[in-house]
Image (cartoon, rainbow, N blue to C red):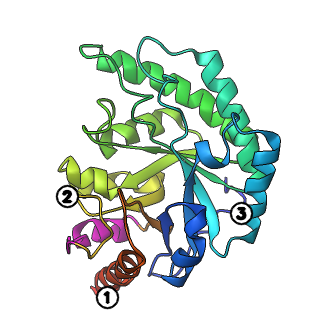
Amino acid sequence: MMVVGFKQQQRPRLALGVVGPIEWDSAIYASGYRMIGESVSKILSPALTEQRFRNNIAKIKQARCRVYMCNILFPPEMKIAGPNVNEQRVLAYADSVFLRADQADIRLIVLGSGTARRIPDGYDAQKAQADFTLLCGKLARLAQKHNIMLALESLEKAETNFLLTLKSTAQVVRAVNNPHFKLNVDIYHMSRENESPQSIIDAADLLIHCEIAEKENRTFPGVKGDDFKPYLRALKKANYKGPIFIEPGGKYTTADMQTGFKYLNRELDEVYAEM
């Protein structure tokens, strides 16, 4: 089943976007990108008044870049894993977010939410994963109701202590088995956890989204000169057709954005030129 709005790219050089503030739309567009990712709390949260949300929709419609996705689905205080999950509250919140995403025509929501999914030290990780998988199944059905794609993201030890590899998040996605619940491959987190690019190939049928940044300081590609080609080759072998979003951390400049666009496209060109 295909989700409306998710036409896969057929060209070998994948579309690039930036996770950044919509206020930077013009600069991001001028740097070559055509898509932006924003946060749920800023754009879609039920905590926003209806007027504020309508103002956000107006900004989205006026933006030169397409607001393609939102991340950080759950606020830190809303637990989604471990012993203190208020499932009714979680599902009601998610239903409201997905409804607003549908109204704003934002079709992809990334489920990372490291603090919200952190489990207590010593808590049974297998039980946490089993319970989390059941919750994700219910979230997936809500996403399906609103024609939204939900992409589960593996993180790293600096952000959480639960589901730290693409391999483990892929297990959850497979168990949920819903066409509206897929996998976000974050190359930055994979490199921080020293996870092999093979995990991308192994999860080829689950991939819907990709994010990237340099390993040391989460900088734009090319700022430090990280070699992403092993991971990009894995994306190629997995026949990944979606976009790649750069998700930087800290402060960055227009020059950094321009460098990232040129550098990542050059690495993609080199990979796709290989026989």
Contact, mark 2 vs mark 1 (Cβ under 8 Å): no
Q: Quick one: SS at disc 3?
A: helix
For the point 59% across and 40% down, which residue is it?
178
Of the image marks 3 and 1, the number of the one nearer the N terminus: 3
Marks 2 and 1, the one that precedes in the sequence: 2
Q: Quadrant of residue 116?
A: top left
Residue 42 falls left or right of residue 123: right
* Secondary structure at numbered mark 1: helix
Q: Please state the extent of the stretch shown in magenta in the rendering.
A: 224-238
- Residue at x 50% of width, y 61% of height: 20
Measuring from the top left, give residue 134's x and y in whole percent: 52, 23
Q: Which mark is residue 60?
A: 3
Upstream in sequence: badge 3 or badge 2:
3
Which percent across, then down, holds residue 246? 41, 65
Q: Quadrant of residue 213?
A: bottom left
Q: Are marks 3 and 2 in contact (CB under 8 Å)?
A: no
Left or right: where 165 falls relative to 50:
left
Does residue 2 appear in this view? yes
Kind of residue at disc 2 = Glu
Task: Give the number of the disc on residue 273.
Answer: 1
Front label number (3 vs 1): 3
Q: Is residue 232 above or below residue 168?
A: below
Measured from the top left, where is residue 140 in percent x and y? 61, 36
Residue position for label 2: 216
**Image x and y of residue 104, in percent:** 75, 54
Q: Quadrant of the C terminus?
A: bottom left
Q: Amino acid at mark 1?
A: Ala
